[in-house]
Amino acid sequence: MSIVQGTCHSFFQELGQAIHDFDNDTLKIALYSADADMNPWTTTAYSATNEVSASGYTAGGASLTSVTWSLYSSYGKGVAYLDAADVAFGVSITARGALIYNSSKANRAIAILDFGASLAKTTFSVVMPDATFEKALIRIGVAGA
């Protein structure tokens, strides 16, 4: 089994189909064990298979808050990027990765996180990277000459 980080390919198609409504939809993040098998090419929706199980952790994970899209635009580059508040689960968990998904739209997958190794934390937190066009977790755009 393996977890491969990236924005889910199905998400790109769904953007073109105007499926997601980021002003009104609920985005969630679920944590997974090292036994999970997720990658951007084939993961299309949330699944409870190999999701972590811990006292105090609710299946399906937690809702993301303060979700915002920003735009970086400069000559030859245009990048939209997503930011959200860090998530603290507040329970003792061991997790290897996570899935961000849209629970308002049939649990459609958005992005997979690979923590690089199984992490055991008393208060498990997922810290979002800097909200910039170069570092944000989810970025959509093009770079030109």
Image (tube, rainbow, N blue to C red):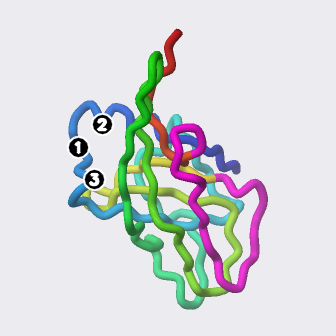
Give neighbour class at mark 2: few <14, some 14-19, many 20+ (Cα, 10 Å): few
Residue 22 is marked as 3
Give me the residue at 60% from left, 65% from top.
127
Observer-nearest residue: 47 or 105?
105
Q: Is residue 104 above or below residue 93?
A: above
Question: Which residue is at a point 56% across and 77% down the rendered structure image?
Answer: 88
The segment highlighted magenta reads: 114-135
Give the structural element (helix, strand or loop) at label 1.
Answer: loop
- According to the picture, the residue beneath numbered tag 2 turns out to be 15
- Which comes sooner in the sequence, label 3 or label 2? 2
Labels 1 & 2 near each other (Cβ < 8 A)? yes
Residue at position x 62%, y 45% from top? Answer: 5
Q: Residue at coordinates 49% horizontally, 48% vertically from top-left?
A: 111
Name the secondary structure under disc 3: loop
Most distant residue in the top direction: 145
Q: Secondary structure at mark 2?
A: helix
Residue 19 is tagged as 1
Say few, some or many: other residues with alpha carbon within 10 Å of mark 1 (under 14 / 14 to 19 / 20 or more): few
Q: Which label is found at residue 114?
A: none
